[in-house]
Image (cartoon, rainbow, N blue to C red):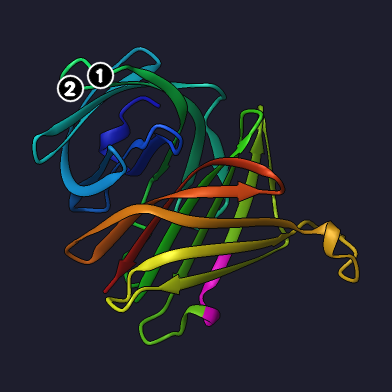
Amino acid sequence: MNDLVRDFFVCGFGDPASGLGGLAWDFGEPGALLLAEGEARPATFALEEGGEALTLEITGGDATLTATVSPRTTELALDDGSGLTASVCVADVSPKGGAESIRCPAQVSRWSSSPVEGAGTFRHLAIDGGDESLVVAVARGEPGVEHGDEQAASWLIRGEDESRFEDAFISTEYDPADNPTRFGLELWPEDSERASRAAATRVSASILGGAGAGDLWAGLFSGHTDGSEGIGSYLLWRA
């Protein structure tokens, strides 16, 4: 994960049970989201790297979380057309003020070129699948294209291996302000039997908290992947 901030990136971590989590990103404009005591708020971040780990300090209002993020797996290349790589990580998170620290799942995605350049919409979703696994999904739409017509791709990372799903379907529910509140993924592996619903990997998630900043909205979600519970993140960029 060296030189993370030199590229376009997303780093997320969190634990739904404790109500703690954070997201930091840079798609040409940096931003962050902090979840503390179950409340999400826009935030800023500072980042330091040392060795294989990075330290991320996220501050929103009077709350600050410091997370030391370390890779559990090597950084894996995912073929999305924009140089996407992803790492399954673990975060040691300490809230400001002496509250109890936690260890929770984390992930880092980064791109060698801008994934939003020329797009009308761009989505990045990452869901902890348990057992050191991670589901990553991206979707890109040309200007004026509806959600259902966006080009989507998704991968399962497990250990040091990644596998791309042949088909990925992303569904999103929105609140009256047009911000996501729930999402679902239906992911079909290659050569799967479409007559059998059990052949697909299914993810459902409901929001823990989210906030918008400029063209980008970000949220942390409580996710369920084929019976496993974990943290999920959703970034939605709209031109």
> Neighbour class for label 1 at 10 Å: few (<14), some, many (≥20)?
few
Residue nearest the viewer, comparing 153 with 97? 97
Residue contact at pointers 1 and 2, CB within 8 angstroms: yes
Q: Position of residue 15 (x, y in %)?
A: 44, 34
Q: Position of residue 61 (x, y in %)?
A: 9, 41
Task: Please state, as top left, top right, bottom left or bottom right, where the C terminus lies in the image.
Answer: bottom left
**Residue at the spot 26% in from the left edge and 48% down from the top edge:** 40
Asked whether residue 197 is in view, the answer is yes
Q: Position of residue 8 (x, y in %)?
A: 31, 46
Query: Given the image, on which type of amino acid does mark 2 rest?
Result: Lys
Up-down: is 176 above or below 58? below
**Residue at the spot 71% in from the left edge and 49% down from the top edge:** 226
Task: Please state, as top left, top right, bottom left or bottom right, where the N terminus lies in the image.
Answer: top left
| Residue picked out by circle 2 | 96
Residue lying at the far bottom in this picture: please name it.
Answer: 144
Using residue 194 as the reference point, say whether residue 119 is left or right of it: left
State which quadrant residue 118 falls in.
bottom left
Using residue 17 as the reference point, say whether residue 171 is left or right of it: right
Residue nearest the viewer, comparing 166 with 229? 229
**Which residues are the magenta region?**
148-152
Q: Secondary structure at mark 2?
A: loop
**Residue at the spot 46% in from the left edge and 84% down from the top edge:** 146
Q: Secondary structure at mark 1?
A: loop
| Residue picked out by circle 1 | 99
Query: Given the image, on which type of amino acid does mark 1 rest?
Result: Ala
State which quadrant residue 62 falls in.
top left
Up-down: is 233 above or below 197? above
